[in-house]
Image (cartoon, helix red, strand yellow):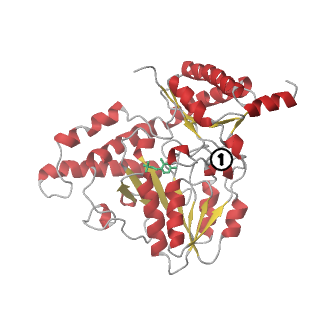
Amino acid sequence: MKQLIYLDNAATTKTRPEVVEAMLPYFSEYYGNPSSVYEFSTITKKAVTGARETIAKSLGARTEEIYFTAGGSESDNWALTAAAEAYQSKGKHIITSKIEHHAVLHTCAHLEKRGFEVTYVDVDENGVVKLDELKKAIRPDTILISIMFANNEIGTIEPIREIGQIAREHGILFHTDAVQAYAHVPINVDEYNIDMLSSSAHKLNGPKGIGFLYIRKGVKIRSFIHGGAQERKRRAGTENVPGIVGYGKAVELAMATLEERSKYETGLRDYLMDRVMAEIPYTRINGSRKNRLPNNVNFAFQFIEGESLLIKLDMEGICGSSGSACTSGSLDPSHVLLAIGLPHEIAHGSLRLTLSEENTKEEMDYVVEKLKEIVAYLRNLSPLYEDFMKKNNR
Ligand SMILES: *Cc1c(COP(=O)(O)O)cnc(C)c1O
């Protein structure tokens, strides 16, 4: 394979070799069902408990508050639908934001069809949820607030502590989609007053298809999958033991390196942002500069199409992601970029690059050089750019 510069870690990450190694014995050697009674099965039962303990500890949660699921989407679906159902006698109003992941937004749309009312709170130009609007949206029948910990497109970290405080003061349940943030920034569920939290292993160098939902003890919530007694009878089905073991290992490694990794990625991220901003004119940074995930960069290059940019980058061995939803069959720019107030034509020229600890400064230099070339090339093809240059006598 030609060289690969992988800058799409918000889409998924590489499963670390240590994680794969930890998982392997649970396929062919220790394959017992954790629910069985014989001694052979206690090995898998213990492995599942161990992973649950590691994860609980990383969040300041209790072991019995961690429920394994098949990923972030399932956790979000469960948290919203089941809490809505469990608390509907109190009210049918839910508050979320305009920039949530579709796993939350589409679940809200589903709930609206079933008689729930949802308020979608605005964000400011940096993608930060407007707290005054959030407070104003609260009604006596509000049962749930769901605001993501950090945004997957623009990397903005939300004021979760304040939101948790507001929810607690009003006696409203608070769920956060922490899929992008967990094990990338420190999170403590008590400190932030979080009642439910979604996570997914493949966003933190674990395997795909395994996630968890943290559910605070005392929160009423119905079972998501009915069947056996697994996951305290709330999510039936034989445990994905290798996945759970891999998840535990990934969390253990991610938590041990969190500070150092964050420092390294932040340095690399800022280097990339600074060089691009200095060397490519008519460019802006989407998302907050201050409250930002360590590994997220999101640019908007005026006068070009993000999709063409992505294809050109791919030809140079660089994997990134654009700000439009073309892949999902729509030509509209992403709801997140529109919510931060970008005009359509600028949102279309957006590029998200999400780093990992494996990326190097040399790679960033290569990316900057290629970006300069490609952006200049695409702008030269653009009639809008030509008009703009003529008008400005450049
Ligand atoms: C990736 C992602 C999800 C979905 O997680 P899956 O495990 O792929 O289902 C949900 N929310 C956010 C913020 C994400 O980035």
Q: What residue do we see at 47% from left, 34% from top? A: 257
Q: What residue do we see at 22% from left, 42% from top? A: 26
In what element is the residue under mark 1? helix
Vertical side of 93 occupied by 180: above or below: above
Question: 3 and 173: which one is in front?
Answer: 3
The image quadrant that residue 237 belongs to is bottom left
The reply to whether residue 61 is in sight is: no
Q: What residue do we see at 63% from left, 63% from top? A: 120
Q: Amino acid at mark 1?
A: Leu
Q: Residue furthest bottom?
A: 89
Quadrant location of the C terminus in the rendered image: top right
Question: 113 and 170: which one is in front?
Answer: 113
Q: What residue do we see at 43% from left, 72% from top? A: 220
Q: Residue furthest left?
A: 38
The reply to whether residue 227 is in sight is: yes
Quadrant location of the N terminus in the rendered image: top left
Find residue 65 and report its horizontal and vertical position in percent: 40, 60
Find residue 84 and report its horizontal and vertical position in percent: 49, 71
Residue located beneath label 1 in the image: 337
